[in-house]
Image (cartoon, rainbow, N blue to C red):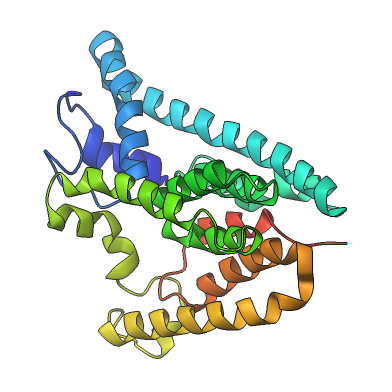
Amino acid sequence: YSDVVSIFSRYFAGKSPELLPYIHYDFNRPPMVALTGYLTSIISYFMRIARGNLAEVATFYILTAILNFTSLISIYIDLKKLGRMFNLKVNFIIMAYTLTLIMFGTYDWTLIAAALSLKGLKYAVLKDEVKASTLLALAVGYNPYTIAYAIGAFTYMAGRGILTFLLVLALVNLYPLLGGWSMLYSAYSRFINWYIEDSWMIFLFPSGYSIYAILLSFILSVLVTIITLKWTLKFNFRRGVIVAWALIISYMLTSYVFRPQSVSYTHLTLPTN
């Protein structure tokens, strides 16, 4: 199974490039996933005309895999640079060959979001506020989990760059808004109103869906954010990295939806001496 193939089959297969996600049909993934999938589908659509249906899905899958593994290379390079900046010893082999990254390298668009997040964090350390804020906003446009990296980055920049971050994020979300408020909701419905998925909360809410599970998840996420920001004050110049790493793990544990591919984010800022 692959989300890439599933989403292609449901939303992009056989559709002419003049048909846009959110505007001409519903799409229940964040806007950057929609944009990346749409651009990839343009190429695969013309392959379908030239070579048939199988060539269409194969082209979409291969192009997405290329984007993901290019992102993995970017992760390796940026993690190495951050390691030098903080004088950290990072086990690159574990990062590059862990089963999580291999399995989910062609599963969905997680690695693209992870690469943008890490690059944004790197630019935050380098005090390049515009690049950092832009990249972090684009990452959130792929997956809201990556807000953890933005919070970590803004601890480096003392809050500077937030306006740029919010502006870019607003522009990203303007796209689904072109289809109406319902399309904006649809873009993030899997994060804000979904059934309990692979979470310990199923023991509290065995029916599989509860508004109280969503509310509990939100409250716990806010609490762990506050606790993490206070706890990490002692880490000084490494604080942003620790914040991002701790929050990613905390959000996964407190969310009513646990998606295994999100574990990929935890490899990027693992603080080791």
Residue at the far top in the pictured view: 50
Say whether residue 101 is left or right of residue 21: right
Quadrant hosting residue 148: bottom right
Q: Residue at x 22, y 39 (%)?
A: 11
Quadrant hosting residue 37: top left
Label count reads 0
Q: Residue at x 39, y 86 (%)?
A: 216
Whether residue 182 is visible: yes
Asked whether 8 or 130 is in front, the reply is 130
Say whether residue 10 is left or right of residue 132: left
Residue at the far bottom in the pictured view: 204
Report x, y in % for residue 39: 33, 27
Report x, y in % for residue 34: 30, 41
Whether residue 91 is visible: no
Report x, y in % for residue 61: 42, 31
Asked whether 247 or 86 is in front, the reply is 86
Say whether residue 113 is left or right of residue 256: right
Q: Residue at x 13, y 42 (%)?
A: 25
Image height check: is 37 above or below 118? above
Report x, y in % for residue 9: 26, 38
Q: Residue at x 76, y 63 (%)?
A: 238
Quadrant of the rendering where the C terminus is positioned? bottom right
Image height check: is 70 above or below 129? above
